[in-house]
């Protein structure tokens, strides 16, 4: 039983396509077909049903898939053990959402490059559902996202951090110098919110309160610019507001009784072999 045949089988299952497996592995489609046929002949069972141009995993194929993933993981672990002394030099396929890619990721990638200059990063910043789907089809190695965007028993979390949320306003805002800001004070202002933070604000507000932001957007730079140059107020996490607060363009508002946060996570698929490049990226987080 050749490991390359097993790898081809797993890739075909995860992409539900011989042609996609061939593209990812750098084979011709006929080579993929030969690899699968060799496994089927060796086992004496049919692993896939071919109906037209579509493939369907058989019951025997489904049984073999879990074992095949374990076999590949064991082989990769052995390879990693034997080559651990070498410097990571492969590709890291990293997925994240726009808010983190614009605020946290640049600094992370600079630190990663300084420490591991041979690692090549491919960054994918899309909506959470698309990123999770790509992770589950082995099109991404690792995700850095907020926990409300990450769910599933098939995911391994290797880093978690609570990121405080706070209300912010321009340093010239009428509430900027007030020592005790109430939720009623906030709700009397113009609001600029992302969809997620609107949901959080609704959760912490009494049911009778009506929240109507005049601007809803996921574009963080637009939110920050609007807040800095108007009397609008927003609810944002620390990682978004650190720089403008340091510059003095916006300030935190001390709102009584508010203790909300986002949970940031780094995850990978449980069946994924943790590459040296993934380990290098994960190693950045304890220092944050």
Image (spheres, rainbow, N blue to C red):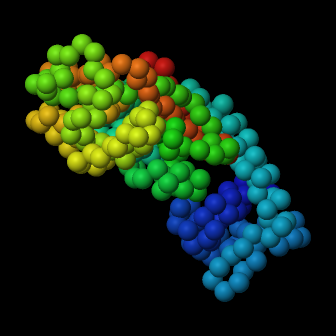
Can you give x and y, in whole percent of width and height, for residue 211 in the image? 33, 43
Q: How many marks?
A: 0
Q: Residue furthest front?
A: 208
Is 129 located above or below residue 223 in the figure?
A: below
Residue at (53% x, 61% y) in the render: 24
Is 227 located above or below residue 161 in the figure?
A: below
Q: Residue furthest bottom?
A: 52
Is 41 located above or below residue 152 in the figure?
A: below
Can you give x and y, in whole percent of width and height, for residue 66 in the image? 77, 53
Can you give x and y, in whole percent of width and height, for residue 247 in the image? 15, 22
Residue at (28% x, 35% y) in the render: 187
Is 47 located above or below residue 190 in the figure?
A: below
Give the camera-side residue of 129 and 42. 129
Quarter of the image with the N terminus in it: bottom right
Q: Is residue 6 visible?
A: yes
Residue at (73% x, 41% y) in the render: 74
Q: Is residue 120 visible?
A: no
Residue at (81% x, 58% y) in the render: 64
Q: Is residue 274 left or right of residue 110?
A: right
Quarter of the image with the C terminus in it: top left
Give the camera-side residue of 147 and 72. 147
Q: Is residue 175 left or right of residue 128?
A: left
Q: Residue furthest top?
A: 179
Can you give x and y, in whole percent of width and height, for residue 269 in the image? 61, 44
């Amino acid at each position: 039983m050749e490991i390359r045949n097993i790898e081809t089988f797993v890739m075909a299952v995860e992409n539900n396509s011989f042609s996609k497996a061939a593209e990812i592995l750098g084979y011709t489609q006929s080579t993929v077909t030969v690899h699968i046929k060799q496994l089927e002949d060796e086992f004496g069972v049919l692993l896939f049903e071919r109906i037209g141009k579509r493939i369907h995993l058989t019951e025997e194929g489904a049984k073999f898939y879990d074992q095949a993933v374990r076999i590949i993981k064991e082989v990769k672990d052995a390879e990693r053990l034997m080559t651990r002394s070498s410097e990571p030099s492969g590709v890291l396929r990293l997925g994240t959402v726009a808010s983190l890619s614009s605020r946290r990721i640049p600094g992370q990638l600079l630190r990663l490059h300084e420490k591991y200059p041979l690692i090549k990063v491919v960054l994918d910043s899309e909506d959470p559902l698309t990123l999770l789907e790509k992770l589950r089809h082995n099109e991404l190695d690792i995700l850095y996202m907020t926990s409300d965007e990450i769910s599933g028993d098939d995911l391994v979390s290797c880093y978690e951090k609570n990121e405080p949320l706070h209300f912010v306003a321009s340093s010239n805002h009428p509430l900027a110098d007030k020592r005790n800001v109430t939720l009623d004070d906030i709700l009397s202002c113009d609001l600029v919110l992302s969809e997620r933070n609107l949901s959080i604000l609704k959760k912490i507000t009494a049911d009778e309160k009506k929240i109507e932001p005049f601007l809803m957007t996921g574009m963080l730079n637009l939110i920050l610019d609007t807040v800095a140059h108007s009397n609008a107020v927003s609810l944002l996490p620390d990682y978004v507001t650190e720089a403008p607060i340091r510059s003095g363009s916006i300030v935190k508002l001390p709102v009584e009784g508010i203790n909300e946060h986002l949970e940031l996570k780094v995850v990978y698929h449980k069946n994924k072999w943790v590459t040296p490049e993934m380990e290098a990226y994960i190693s950045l987080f304890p220092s944050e």
